[in-house]
Structures are given as structure tokens and as C-alpha cells.
Image (cartoon, helix red, strand yellow):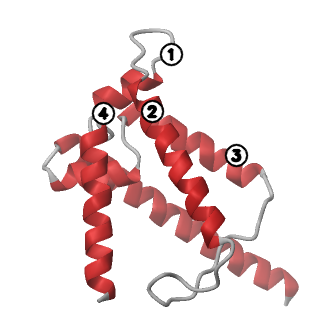
Amino acid sequence: MNRISEFVVGLLFGVGLIISGMTDPGKVIGFLDLFGAWDPSLALVMGGAILVGLLAFTIAKKRTITFLGGALRLPASTTIDKRLLGGGLLFGAGWGLAGFCPGPALVSLGSGQPKALVFVLAMLAGMLAFELTERRALRLAARRTA
């Protein structure tokens, strides 16, 4: 039953991304072009997403299990540090240059957009680089304390 629910939610999310125009890099770049041919339509999409997110987190904070019975663990950290800021800057730069963020890129990849393939490969390479860097940092920290 969980897999069916996951599939339906993922399908709904993907359809929502397509309908909202988030899978069109030109529309996203137009939204980010504040001093050119600015297209404000995605502001409505983002506003709607923020409202849904606020509602979802308000409900989630009061729960300890998901609606499907799994453990519900929300992030506890509220620290804004160099890593968070750096990651946000990298994410924003990638979004602005490519016109994709991870969810829409995967949906666009599924529809055969070649630009999405390049983005997803670069995203996977970045994720791998992060994992390798984190593992190396943990090994070095363990050696220092040993």
C-alpha cells in the first residue's frame, strides 16, 4: 500500500510541476530575470507551495508518525552556517543557469529533455562529490580524536 501511495503522490507532484511550468527552463529563467523580461507567474506557484508547506509543517509538528504509519522526524537544527549559505548559493546559481531544480529536472528527464539529462548528471556528480568530501572529513576528524 505504501508503494502505491508513494507512486500516486509522486505522480501528482510531477503533474503539478508540468502544469505550473516549472519543467520549462525558459519560464524559470524568465522568472529569475528581474531586470529583463521578468515573468512573475511562477511567484504564484511559489506562493502556493509556501502555503501548502506551512500547513504541512504545522500539522507535522504535532505528529510523531506519518499518515502511513512511519516514524516522523523533522530536522531539529535552526543554525544558519557557512555550509547552509554556500549550499543555498550553489543551488541558486545552478537554478539560475540551468532553469532547473532537482524535482523538475527529474520530471523533464522523464519527458526526454536533453538539457535535463545534463543537469541531472551534474547534480549526481555534485551529490557524489559532497558524499566523498563528507566521508573524508569524518575520517580526518576521527584520526584527530584517536
For the residues marked 3 and 4, what is the alpha-carbon distance in whole angstroms?
24 Å
Q: Earlier in the sequence, mark 4 or mark 2?
A: 4
Residue positioned 39% across, 19% down in the render: 39
Location of mark 2 (residue):
44
Report helix, strand or loop for mark 2.
helix
Residue positioned 26% across, 73% down in the render: 7
Q: Depth check: 78 or 58 in front?
A: 58
Q: Residue 49: percent from the left, percent from the top? A: 48, 47
Q: Residue 99: percent from the left, percent from the top? A: 36, 35
- Residue type at mark 4 is Pro
Q: Is residue 117 left or right of residue 84?
A: left
Q: Is residue 112 left or right of residue 49?
A: left
Rate crowding at label 1 as few (under 14), some (14 to 19) or many (20 or more) other CA atoms within 10 Å.
Answer: few
Residue positioned 56% across, 43% down in the render: 90
Residue positioned 31% across, 47% down in the render: 17
Location of mark 4 (residue):
25
Report helix, strand or loop for mark 4.
helix
- Residue type at mark 2 is Leu
Contact, CB < 8 Å: mark 2 with mark 1? no
- Disc 3 or disc 4, which is closer to the eye? 4
User: Which labelled disc corresponds to residue 34?
Assistant: 1
Contact, CB < 8 Å: mark 4 with mark 2? no
Contact, CB < 8 Å: mark 2 with mark 3? no
